[in-house]
Image: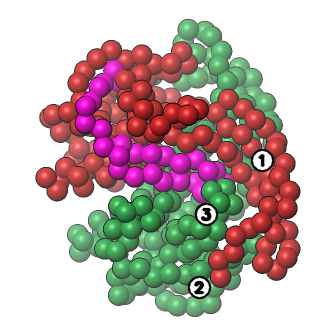
Chain colours: A red, B green
């Protein structure tokens, strides 16, 4: 039986630059209480940029949370009152310098609904045009182009390890192979 | 240029049941400092259970973080010193009652490396055998079987909104269609 957990108490632990943390006390169907640790996140956008040569444009950057360099599709968090498609255009330009007249919404999903409300909106940007990247002050990013078939192999062999990138590449692959 | 951010200071904000939060002060290439808000998570396992009829077994549950009922593949977080495959067998039994002699590791990935170290290990469990579910005290779960082609459509039309489920279903689809 599905039961919506009623909030009996909500305690804000931390309010930060990117995320907040709160602890909710919820009531379960048996009337017992339980605690839920919840990370609040403004949501994010990720873009699969596809060149006219059928390559995907990735960014490579160090991630402090995982202490690894990761190969990812361009992405960034939503600003206040920003529409996902505006965020997609902005982040694509900032991180790669690319521009596209052809940006298509694909899907949105929750990255890890067991503890965070972060929703990631995925877009495909086709026929991308080169320009100058303008990364944020604390972003150090390399741009890498990879053929889509090779990218699929890099998911299977574990070279690509980022969730939004795995989903975005599969979505782009399905779209391209359909015609 | 890729640069590994050196930790200059690390402050623990919260240490909880499922996650912890810390703020790292890091040094950037230009010697300036920046803050990183990091959610520490023990990691999780997700399992795609496939019946002999080619159906995937999902669980449906309310998620407090997103305030929605979500359709997901069975999953759970790693216990201390637990191997991912042991966790997969345990969570599959707890959430669905199912058992399988045929559990295959597929890949692992980071759910949202911009702010958390959570790594999710994906397994496929074939030829599953029915048994009695034993959910945890604070888990209320429905079990639902769905044909794999329908599940793919439910990703595309936005009915399935959970990241690990999207990745797991695509991996299972690739495996089944290859033979």
- Disc 2 and disc 1: Cα gap in Å? 32 Å
Q: Earlier in the sequence, mark 2 or mark 3?
A: 3
Query: Image quadrant of residue A63?
Result: top right
Q: Magenta stretch containing residue A96, yes or no?
A: yes
User: Comparing marks 2 and 3, which lies closer to the viewer?
Assistant: 3
Q: Which residues fall within the magenta stretch?
A: A95-123
Query: Image quadrant of residue B9?
Result: top right
B86 or B18, which is in the foreground? Answer: B18
Q: Chain of mark 3?
A: B
Q: Chain of mark 1?
A: A
Query: How many residues crowd mark 3 within 10 Å: few (<14), some (14–19), many (20+)?
Result: some
| Residue B3 visible in image | no
Q: Position of residue B77 (x, y in %)?
A: 64, 61
What residue is shown with label 2? B97
Q: How many numbered dots are placed on residues in this image?
A: 3
What residue is shown with label 3? B68
- Disc 1 and disc 3: Cα gap in Å? 17 Å
| Residue A76 visible in image | yes
Query: Image quadrant of residue B94?
Result: bottom right
């Amino acid at each position: 039986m599905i039961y919506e957990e009623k909030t009996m108490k909500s305690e804000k632990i931390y309010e930060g630059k990117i995320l907040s943390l709160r602890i909710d006390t919820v009531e379960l169907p048996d009337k017992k209480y339980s605690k839920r640790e919840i990370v609040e996140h403004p949501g994010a956008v990720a873009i699969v940029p596809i060149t006219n040569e059928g390559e995907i444009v990735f960014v490579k950057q160090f991630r402090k949370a995982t202490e690894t360099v990761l190969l990812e599709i361009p992405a960034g968090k939503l600003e206040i009152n920003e529409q996902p498609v505006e965020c997609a255009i902005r982040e694509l330009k900032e991180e790669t310098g690319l521009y596209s007249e052809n940006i298509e919404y694909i899907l949105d999903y929750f990255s890890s609904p067991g503890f965070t409300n972060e929703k990631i909106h995925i877009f495909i940007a086709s026929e991308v045009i080169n320009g100058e990247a303008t990364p944020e002050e604390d972003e150090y990013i390399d741009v890498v182009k990879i053929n889509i078939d090779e990218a699929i192999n890099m998911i299977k062999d574990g070279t690509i390890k980022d969730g939004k990138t795995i989903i975005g590449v599969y979505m782009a692959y399905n779209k391209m192979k359909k015609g």
